[in-house]
Image (cartoon, helix red, strand yellow):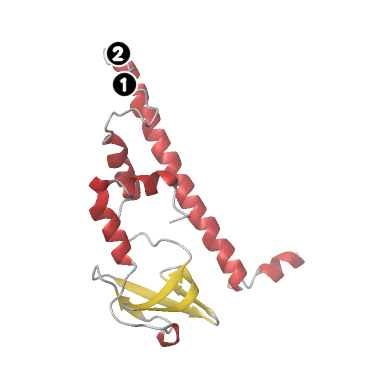
């Protein structure tokens, strides 16, 4: 969860979002005891949500749905853990909509510095401007989240040697 935007983690850990957090966590769990030596290219693993995760192997690098396994075969009492380098957001989980919903369900306790108690509600222009600003903030957060994920994936692929064109590009 370290690579997720703070606002997304905050929203997911709110008590009212327990189902969403559980959905994302269960997306990362598969039944049984699968070791890294049992994983092969294009293998599909059904997770506890009933979705399929796809395995991609490239030499010594193993990926599950684009997330790299960084620590293999941690034996636990209830299975085997494969630690991955990022949180896999399940298909269909609309992060921008979730953030919008989460951020509009403000409890007005003013811990979020949004000036809820001081806003002049008689001025509809102020409300419109605040809503527009909030929407821009959400879009910025989503773009930053997506950009960070792309940058991280590109860096990992280069570190893994997936980008064979590096030598060719350096010669030009």
Is residue 78 in view from this perspective? yes
Measure the C-alpha gap from mark 2 to mark 1.
7 Å
Position of residue 32 relative to residue 122, above or below, is: below
- Residue of label 1: 127
* Residue at the spot 41% in from the left edge and 34% down from the top edge: 136
- SS class of the residue under badge 2? loop
Horizontal side, residue 170 vs residue 43: left or right: right
The image position of residue 55, as x and y in percent, is: 41, 77
Q: Tell whether label 1 touches label 2 (CB within 8 Å).
A: yes
Q: Which residue is mark 2?
A: 123
Residue 105: image quadrant is: top left
Whether residue 91 can be seen here: no
The percent coordinates of residue 107 (x first, y second) are 26, 33
Rendered image quadrant of residue 113: top left
Mark 1 surroundings within 10 Å by alpha-carbon count, few (fewer than 14), some (14 through 19), many (20 or more) = some
For the image, the number of numbered tags is 2
């Amino acid at each position: 969860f370290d690579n997720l935007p703070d606002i997304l983690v905050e929203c997911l850990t709110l008590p009212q979002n327990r189902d969403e957090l559980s959905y994302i966590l269960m997306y990362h769990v598969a039944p049984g005891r699968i070791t890294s030596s049992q994983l092969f290219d294009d293998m599909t693993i059904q997770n506890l949500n009933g979705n399929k995760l796809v395995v991609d192997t490239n030499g010594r690098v193993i990926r599950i749905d684009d997330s790299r396994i960084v620590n293999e075969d941690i034996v636990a009492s209830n299975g085997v853990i494969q630690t991955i380098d990022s949180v896999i957001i399940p298909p269909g989980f609309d992060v921008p909509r979730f953030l919008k919903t989460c951020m509009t369900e403000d409890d007005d306790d003013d811990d979020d510095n949004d000036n809820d108690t001081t806003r002049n509600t008689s001025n509809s222009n102020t409300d419109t401007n605040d809503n527009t600003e909030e929407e821009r903030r959400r879009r910025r957060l989503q773009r930053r989240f997506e950009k960070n994920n792309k940058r991280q994936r590109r860096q990992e692929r280069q570190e893994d040697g997936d980008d064979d064109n590096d030598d060719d590009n350096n010669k030009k």
